[in-house]
């Protein structure tokens, strides 16, 4: 770990000013990702700004919009009665993430910013375009069982690890950002970037920007929602495939469906064409199978992960069947 300087921000303006004072600064809250990467010599900030004193905490239902502070702890958000009742998929995605100890430290904003668990990325002995652009992707022709079948490129096939980000993408979440230049809002589906030719650029976050809040609209799909996570062991493991889904059915007919996939793509993966195709169909296996086929359209399996295509389809059908109560 290289030497670095440290400051504690006592206000929002203090945080923005402290960040701007160094060419290679990083914000830190829970630190459950950043500190690990610093120990591996992957992240090498010259200055760290602690933002835990900022007032980006708590939650409220503002009319039909859930607003959660970016510094709210994962465990606290997951256990809020209003969130469990009105946004069960969000709550479940948080409860199925990491371990209780990490959920008690990690913040929602930090969870969105966590970096891939690709073993080649985290082992500096291997070439990795995320760490050193242009060095190559060791996973592409290596052991890629856990890697992406959607949204990848020859430059990177690492999956995004966040469960919470998948649920936010499914339910039209909005991420609120603030910098010295002002405020802006970004759709959760647009926050993370596809690797393309620049896999080292992972989000739309600009240098010095803070995630201040996350908002999610309350809809019938959010009320009738769930999160399914398939993994190699029952706890403290990242998704091989996951599904965040919500379903609205009237008189046996699908009125609306929302679905996003994790564990299979380089970012939380949502297929709007698949959702639209299901509207107006009888809620049943045929419609769910068709939606699953469309959601996995364009999947490109690699040498060790072709099984993910059928696994993801089965997970979609299982999740929607459960929500339809059939």
Image (cartoon, rainbow, N blue to C red):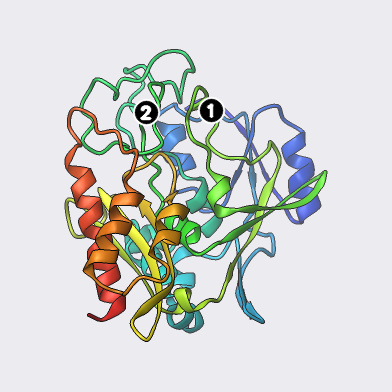
In three-dimensional space, the C-alpha distance between marks 1 and 2, rounded to whole angstroms, equals 14 Å
Q: Of the two numbered discs 1 and 2 on the same chain, state the one appearing first in sequence.
A: 1
Nearer to us in this view, 44 or 268 = 268
Say which residue appears at 38% left-offset and 21% top-offset.
154
Figure label count: 2
Mark 2 neighbour class, 10 Å CA radius: few under 14, some 14 to 19, many 20 or more: many
What residue did someone put label 1 on?
Answer: 44
One can see residue 239 in this view = no
Asked which quadrant contains residue 152, the reply is top left
Tell us which disc is closer to us: 1 or 2. Answer: 2
Task: Label 2: state its secondary structure.
Answer: loop
Q: Do callouts 1 and 2 mark residues in contact (Cβ within 8 Å)?
A: no
Whole-percent x, y for residue 63 in the image: 66, 82
Nearer to us in this view, 56 or 194 = 194
Whole-percent x, y for residue 87 in the image: 46, 75
Say which residue appears at 76% left-offset and 56% top-offset.
11
Residue that protrudes farthest toward the top in the picture: 135
Quadrant housing the C terminus: bottom left
One can see residue 241 in this view = yes
What residue did someone put label 2 on?
Answer: 121
Asked which quadrant contains residue 64, the reply is bottom right
Mark 1 neighbour class, 10 Å CA radius: few under 14, some 14 to 19, many 20 or more: some
Say which residue appears at 37% left-offset and 86% top-offset.
251
Placement of 164 over or under 84, stated as above or below: above
Whole-percent x, y for residue 290 in the image: 29, 57
Image side of residue 322 versus residue 177, left or right:
left
Placement of 160 over or under 282, stated as above or below: above
Residue 279: numbered disc = none
Image side of residue 204 versus residue 120, left or right:
right
Whole-percent x, y for residue 321 in the image: 25, 72
Task: Label 1: state its secondary structure.
Answer: loop
């Amino acid at each position: 770990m290289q030497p670095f300087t440290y400051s504690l921000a006592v206000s929002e303006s203090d945080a923005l000013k402290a960040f701007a004072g160094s060419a290679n600064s990083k914000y830190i809250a829970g630190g459950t990702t950043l500190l690990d990467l610093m120990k591996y010599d992957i992240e090498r900030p010259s200055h760290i700004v602690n933002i835990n004193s900022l007032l980006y905490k708590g939650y409220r239902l503002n009319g039909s919009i859930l607003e959660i502070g970016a510094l709210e702890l994962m465990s606290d958000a997951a256990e809020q009665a209003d969130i469990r009742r009105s946004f069960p998929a969000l709550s479940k995605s948080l409860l199925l993430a990491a371990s209780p100890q990490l959920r008690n430290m990690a913040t929602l904003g930090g969870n969105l910013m966590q970096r891939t668990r690709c073993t080649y990325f985290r082992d500096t002995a291997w070439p990795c375009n995320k760490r050193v652009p242009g060095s190559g992707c060791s996973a592409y022709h290596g052991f890629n069982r856990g890697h992406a079948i959607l949204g990848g490129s020859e430059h990177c096939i690492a999956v995004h690890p966040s469960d919470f980000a998948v649920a936010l993408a499914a339910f039209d979440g909005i991420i609120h950002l603030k910098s010295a230049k002002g405020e802006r809002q970004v759709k959760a589906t647009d926050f993370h970037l596809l690797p393309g030719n620049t896999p080292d650029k992972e989000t739309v976050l600009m240098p010095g920007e803070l995630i201040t809040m996350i908002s999610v609209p309350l809809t019938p799909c959010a009320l009738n929602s769930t999160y399914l996570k398939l993994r190699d062991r029952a706890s403290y493991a990242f998704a091989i495939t996951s599904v965040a889904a919500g379903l609205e059915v009237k008189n046996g007919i699908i009125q609306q469906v929302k679905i996003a996939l994790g564990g299979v793509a380089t970012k939380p993966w949502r297929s709007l064409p698949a959702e639209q195709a299901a509207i107006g169909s009888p809620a049943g296996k045929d419609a769910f199978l068709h939606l699953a086929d469309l959601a996995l359209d364009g999947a490109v399996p690699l040498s060790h992960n072709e099984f993910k295509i059928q696994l993801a389809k089965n997970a979609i059908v299982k999740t929607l069947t459960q929500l339809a109560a059939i």
